[in-house]
Amino acid sequence: MSKRLLRSGLIVSTMTLVSRVLGLVRDVVVANLMGAGAAADVFFFANKIPNFLRRLFAEGAFSQAFVPVLTEYHAAGDMDRTRQLIARASGTLGVIVTVVTLLGILGSGVVTALFGAGWFIDWLNDGPAAPKFELASLLLKITFPYLWFITFVALSGAILNTLGKFAVSSFTPVFLNVAIIGCAWFLAPQLSQPEIGLAIGVFLGGSSSFYSKFLSYIRRECW
């Protein structure tokens, strides 16, 4: 037991270190590309909204209620009830997050007006001369699907941790960092608005975490 705990701790620590280093590289690359101008403000706004909602859905009350029950069922060796719990939790959370994500994409202008009221007022007064509002609405359409992807990644991570599979879960942030760094280096400089390239990096980071790692791993290990 102690060897397993030590190995798990070492894996998580190593993956966390890699993620932190890449996160630092990401911040440096983004700062070098965007500076501290209006475009940077808009990108960070569009990135912050889905991350705020991620904390609500993936790391909030749902996770605190789900993980103890899952652990209890798994410890009791009742795999049928464990599978039923995972299926019901995934279905319920999936419906809610899908609706919220679609509303966020379709209503990105409303979301921007609510959380970026100053930009909205400037846009009402000056129109095209105040581009922050329209740009923020566009970037939100690109970054909002990240909420859907990362919510299921977090759900999968909770399941994997309960099953003692720590490496995959701790590696999740690496996908986002690598995607943003890659888009900042190769895609953003080719665009007239580099911040769009960074928003695409957020989307790719979430989707790659979801598709490339967690779905295949959950299917192989849990079912």
Image (spheres, rainbow, N blue to C red):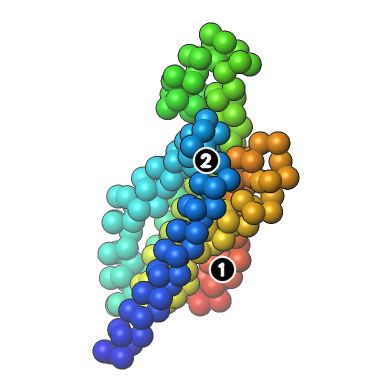
The amino acid at mark 2 is Gly
Q: Nearer the viewer, residue 28 or 51?
A: 28
Among the 4 quarters of the image, the one containing residue 181? bottom right
Q: Residue 213's mark? A: 1
Q: What's the residue at 43%, 45% (across, down)?
A: 51
Q: What's the residue at 39%, 65% (across, down)?
A: 158
Q: Residue 8's mark? A: none
Q: Please determine whether, in this image, residue 170 is positioned above or below residue 117.
A: below
Q: Nearer the viewer, residue 207 or 57?
A: 207
In which quadrant is the N terminus drawn? bottom left
Label 1 Cα crowd, 10 Å radius (few <14 / some 14-19 / many 20+): some
Label 2 SS: loop
Among the 4 quarters of the image, the one containing residue 199? top right
Q: Please determine whether, in this image, residue 54 is positioned above or below residue 173.
A: above
Label 2 Cα crowd, 10 Å radius (few <14 / some 14-19 / many 20+): few
Q: Nearer the viewer, residue 58 or 35?
A: 35
Q: Earlier in the sequence, mark 1 or mark 2?
A: 2
The amino acid at mark 1 is Lys
Q: Nearer the viewer, residue 27 or 98?
A: 27
| The residue positioned farthest toward the right in the image shown | 190
- Residues at marks 1 and 2, CA–CA distance in whole angstroms: 33 Å
Tell me where residue 2 appears, x and y as whole percent.
26, 89
Residue bearing mark 2: 35
The answer to whether one can see residue 213 in this image is: yes
